[in-house]
């Protein structure tokens, strides 16, 4: 394709898409469940201390339990065992498991404009879903979303690192990449994609987890910021 200055540039041939809070709502439902659990715990232990301990342990356990609801629930139970001296009241344990199951089996609600924007790319470019979390749960959410037919490949990964993106998209010309990654997390979707030589398109979400936050790399020539999914896809359509 011809660039704005009249020189030939490589078209984007593959686009990676984050899932949670890029394609569909996730943090909104997770935060509601988290708030409910902390209200429950507050009847038995100091809620402020529990919240601090839980947040720290959840991040610490990511390498062991992974991302997603199951890892979160395991960390929650681990903190509770400590706080309750190894004897969690059965009523509390039942409520915790009930909230966990509701998170695993909740409905999926797409973010605004996602389905139409994805459809506009049908048959024009390879689309790859690149998401962290539990394999079964992520595939279930994709099935419920109704978006599966819009993806050529599904990659559920334990971490999003530069090597992850190199494996999925192959080597890139750093000055003229043929792949792009789009997502809401600077830490997972943007920085490692840039390190792997991809374009990185950031669509911020109001409820992005603090652990996934980082200063945006505004000085990187392959970084782009958009206020909506449709705007990001519009930019990509001009480059495929």
Image: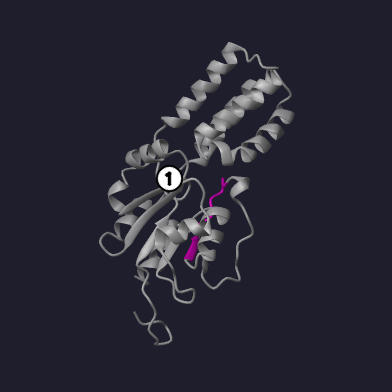
| Percent position of residue 26, x then y | 48, 41
Magenta stretch contains residue 200: yes
Q: Residue furthest left?
A: 123
Q: Is residue 18 left or right of residue 14?
A: right
Q: Is residue 106 left or right of residue 148?
A: right
Which residue lies at the image location 39% right of the left edge and 49% below the top edge?
A: 155
Q: Is residue 142 visible?
A: yes
User: What span is in magenta?
Assistant: 199-208
Picture quarter containing residue 3? bottom left
SS label for mark 1: loop
Q: Which residue is found at the position 46% from the left and 27% from the top?
A: 102
Measured from the top left, where is residue 22 in percent x and y?
Answer: 46, 50
Question: Which quarter shows the N terminus?
Answer: bottom left
- Quadrant of the rendering where the C terminus is positioned: bottom left
The location of residue 67, given as percent across then percent down, is 52, 40
Asked if residue 219 lies left or right of residue 44, the reply is: left
Task: State whether residue 6 is above or below residue 44.
Answer: below
Q: Residue at x 43, y 64 (%)?
A: 180
Extreme-top residue of the structure: 90
State whether residue 113 appears in this view: no
**134 or 166, which lies in front?**
166
Give the number of callouts.
Answer: 1
The rendered magenta stretch, by its main secondary structure, is classed as loop
Q: Residue under circle 1?
A: 24
Reply above or below: 233 against 66: below
In this rendering, the answer to whether 92 lies above or below 158 is above
């Amino acid at each position: 394709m011809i660039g704005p200055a009249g020189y030939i540039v490589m078209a984007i041939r593959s686009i990676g898409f984050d899932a949670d809070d890029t394609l569909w709502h996730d943090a909104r439902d997770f935060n509601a469940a988290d708030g409910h659990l902390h209200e429950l715990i507050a009847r038995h232990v100091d809620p402020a201390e529990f919240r601090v301990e839980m947040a720290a342990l959840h991040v610490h356990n990511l390498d062991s339990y992974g991302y997603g609801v199951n890892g979160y629930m395991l960390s929650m139970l681990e903190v509770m065992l400590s706080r309750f001296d190894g004897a969690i009241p059965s009523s509390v344990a039942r409520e915790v498991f009930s909230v966990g199951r509701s998170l695993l089996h909740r409905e999926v609600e797409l973010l605004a404009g996602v389905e139409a924007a994805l459809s506009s790319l049908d048959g024009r470019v390879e689309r790859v879903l690149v998401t962290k979390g539990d394999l079964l749960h992520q595939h279930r959410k994709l099935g419920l979303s109704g978006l599966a037919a819009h993806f050529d490949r599904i990659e559920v990964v334990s971490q999003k690192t530069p090597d992850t993106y190199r494996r999925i998209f192959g080597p890139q010309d750093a000055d003229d990449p043929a792949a792009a990654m789009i997502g809401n997390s600077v830490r997972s979707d943007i920085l490692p994609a840039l390190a792997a030589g991809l374009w990185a398109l950031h669509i911020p979400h109001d409820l992005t987890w603090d652990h996934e936050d980082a200063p945006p790399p505004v000085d990187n020539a392959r970084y782009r910021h958009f206020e909506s999914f449709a705007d990001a896809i519009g930019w990509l359509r001009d480059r495929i």
